[in-house]
Amino acid sequence: MVDSAIRKIIHVDMDAFFASVEQRDDPSLRGRPVAVGHGAARGVVAAASYEARKFGVKSALPSVTARRRCPELIFVPPRFEVYKEVSRQIHEVFARYTDLIQPLSLDEAYLDVTANKAGIETAWKTAKAIRAAILEETGLTASAGISYNKFLAKLASDHRKPNGQFAVTPDMGEAWVETLPVSRFHGVGPVTADKMKGLGIETGADLRAKSLEFLQQHFRGSAEWYYAIARGIDHRPVNPNRVRKSSGSETTFDRDLSDAAEIEAGILKMADDVWAWCDSRQAFGRTVTVKIKYGDFQQITRSRSQPSVIVTQESLRRSAVDLVRTVLPPAKGIRLVGVTVSNFAEAAATEPVAVETELPIFAESQAA
């Protein structure tokens, strides 16, 4: 048995979190199809209730498409400060049962309950207690997956949604993985799933049948991960000190923009949003990336790394504007812009960077 088999890991995932908070706070929305986001012509769905999901409404779907799929859809503007506060309440519940908590987002986290801080007989009963406490204290439901490693626990949490839980025990893990479509596996996105399908890999069993050499030939650096998870193996510990790798913000304009001043204003607003997060957490990075999406949905990025971390708002603003100016005036209208800071480091031993220094642009990508 692999070492990770001795662990007891729970993956807790809130059910339709943003939409459920809105339905909780506004009884008139309960039982109705709800989308968190903006219903304007150029809006995007941030989250959808289960009633809306039945119509194919999901996150990242353009609002126009969402309304077409579900004419009765109700749009509610997001209230992120409320979601953050509810998330804080949920994490207070987690802390009663374990000190090993690895948040993945506002609404999901891994918990290692091997040490049995709460003195509950089994991980299954611990998960039930956590879900009951969340429901009692927030009025929201959560689903949970219980297993001996993170990969299986995350798969399991989706198996009985909403408001359910499922356990994958050491004696069933490998066989269970073989029955699942690879499109459900963490780390296998839509593009990779299509590539695997072209290679005759559609289930965990298909993936397991491929040699490591075959996977290395076709998937390079990801081969060992795919080889391991096809066998239900994942040695990653629950890491409560996991460092966030980036912070970003983006916005979709009401109309495609071609005016340089308007585009720069949008970039500055996104830079200020990112700076507010960095400053509040004293987390500073060396790399600034500007994302641009044109009206035809072509997407490019421009990135620049500084010799030391950026620790002033003005430095971030200047760097972001310098990057966007490399594509101005635009060849076609711009639909969306975003700013991200990454390559974080401790700021204590650094000095503010002078962003006027000319540094090479090293990243550019395109996507339809």
Image (cartoon, rainbow, N blue to C red):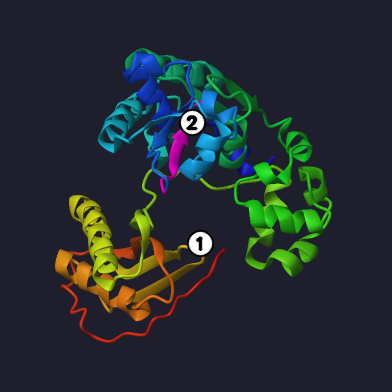
Residue 350 sits in which quadrant? bottom left
- At horizontal 72% and vertical 55% (from top left) the residue drawn is 194
In which quadrant will I find the C terminus? bottom right
Question: What secondary structure is found at the residue carrying circle 2?
Answer: strand
- Residues at marks 2 and 1, CA–CA distance in whole angstroms: 31 Å
Residue 44 in sight: yes
Find residue 352 and report its horizontal and vertical position in percent.
Answer: 16, 73
Above or below — where is 147 with respect to 226? above
Near mark 1 (Cα within 10 A), the count class, few <14, some 14-19 or many ≥20, is some
In which quadrant will I find the N terminus? top right
Residue with the mark numbered 1 = 297
Residue type at tag 1: Phe
Magenta span: 42-49
Residue 97 sits in which quadrant? top left
Residue with the mark numbered 2 = 13
Find residue 108 and report its horizontal and vertical position in percent.
Answer: 45, 35
| Nearer to me, 309 or 348 | 309
Point out the tag, 2 or 1, that comes first from the N-terminus: 2
Near mark 2 (Cα within 10 A), the count class, few <14, some 14-19 or many ≥20, is many
